[in-house]
Amino acid sequence: MIALLRGVKVSVLLATLLLIPSISSAGSADKPVIMNPMIWADVPDPDIIRVDDTFYLMSTTMHLMPGAPVMKSKDLMNWETVGYVFDRLTDSPKYDMLQGTVYGRGQWATSLKFHQSAADRKAGRRGRFYALFAPNERGSMGDTYICSAEHAEGPWQVVSRLRHFHDCSLFFDDDDRVYVVYGTGELMELKPDLSDVIEGTHRQIFEREADETGLLEGSRMIKHNGRYYLLMISHVYAPGRHRREVCYRADDIRGPYEKQVILESDYGGFSYAGQGTIVDTKDGDWYGVIFQDRGGVGRVPLIMPCRWIDGWPMLGDEDGQIPARLRPLVSGQKASSVVRSDDFSDSRLGLHWQWNHNPVDNAWTLDERRGWLRLKTSHVAENLFLARNTLTQRMPGPVCSGIVTLDVSHLRDGDCAGFAAFNSDSGVLTVKKKGRRLVLEVSEQSVTLSEREKAVEHVEEKVVSTVDLGKASRIWLRIDGDFRPLSDQPAGYGGRDTASFFYSLDGRQWTEVLSDYKLRFDWRRFFMGSKFAIFCYATKKTGGYVDVDSFELKNED
């Protein structure tokens, strides 16, 4: 079960019309510029569509709830989160951290579509949004969800549950027939009401070529000028071979298909990019949005021109390279971001926040102390990786600083509250109540997960320092992240990926307690970029709580 939310045809396009080579890296005071990455934060497996003059983007957030985020923009530069497809997943107690966890699993690679059927047009209806995702799980937990909404912001409803389809693309054809393309070149047709597949329609629409011996997945299908285009990531694990984006095209959805490499480019001191899709504007220009692995910050989306050449959607500039900057569309949209500060004065929690696993709804509140977020201990946990109601937000690049202000006067003996650079390897600032004493414990923590159930088997914890807080009732905690590329290393080496940790008893004078902590991306465990995390859990007895006054984010573009 799923718990739902509340509520021109184009010929060859010239990349030179989109690029601004004369603008410095800092941009121009009177001409806004999209600087790559389009979003310098963990937004992997992107699917992007346009409806009228608005672009909608979806991404993978796995074990974070609510899930399947919907991001919106009118200029391809300023993005904000406007909704989620679901509040929580309830297929297994593991989503509640019982009998295991879903670290690195949960919602994956959502396919986003908008479809107006012939019946909609006849009745004067606008059409609907559709989202399809398959949790990265075995058995019924991995069954595919198809959800639908009148508005991208929601509310979304479950249309059906289907068998598991890996990295799939939902596709509505011009005749209203519906398909799912998945795996490596597999296709099935769905029933008109999307209730199930039509048995007997499975088809292998192409076979791997000799040079496609590695990764070949991430299906995204579109139709343009009567042809079918299937975009996929390809990565051959061999010396001298790079991650790339390939395209298969055909005049019939069932094939035969021919293949073209449409992007093979590194960018910005990081490795080669791959996996994403293309989208057009109202004026008939086309763009590609493809993600790039960037280590500790996660997998970030890059934007680039898409030029139709000989019927192929070629990505990058005229040399096939990812550009540093592009002109945004003219829209008048105000500056916005998917990561932001928060003073918790709103009556609802901001959409820029996500919980680690399903939250315990009665153990957090914005009402009991207006202008503050209260996190209550709801159960006894052995460690941070099993703590419920840990609240997270992406750590953005290239450099960032997050500051939380905490009232710790209501913690009970054994309670732990604080702030972390959260991942499978975490740097943690923990205020601990030990009897009548309060101490700040600075630690490096690394979790070991079982392969099958993702159960927390062991947490290796290295305590770097301990600070006696005396009678302090309020404390400020700060984490600075540095994800800038290592410019003195060859392309593909990666970024600095470090964090430094500080505390203050007055919000003005800061004491550094841990520097240059290495932030790591590990696909075998969390499979996501580093997150700011605010937490409060009990190790002995429930009943305590921490009040969070604010979260302040500073981010250098």
Image (cartoon, rainbow, N blue to C red):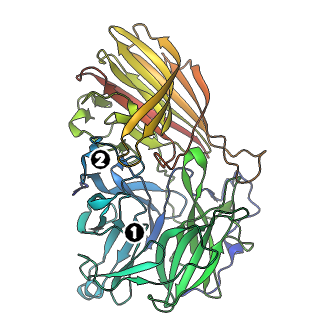
Which quadrant holds the N terminus? bottom left
91 relative to 532 in the view: left or right:
left
From the top left corner, tell me how far across and down residue 260 is, in percent: 63, 80
| Secondary structure type for disc 1 | strand
Above or below 249: residue 475: above
From the top left corner, tell me how far across and down residue 259 is, in percent: 60, 82
| Secondary structure type for disc 2 | helix
Q: Which residue is found at the position 40% from the left and 46% from the top?
A: 103
Q: Which residue is mark 2?
A: 95
Dot label at residue 47: none
Q: Which residue is found at the position 32% from the left and 31% from the top?
A: 371
From the top left corner, tell me how far across and down residue 91 is, in percent: 24, 54
Q: Which residue is found at the position 40% from the left and 84% from the top?
A: 203
Label 1 is placed on what type of residue? Leu
Query: Which residue is at the front of the view, 148 or 161?
Result: 161
Dot label at residue 112: 1
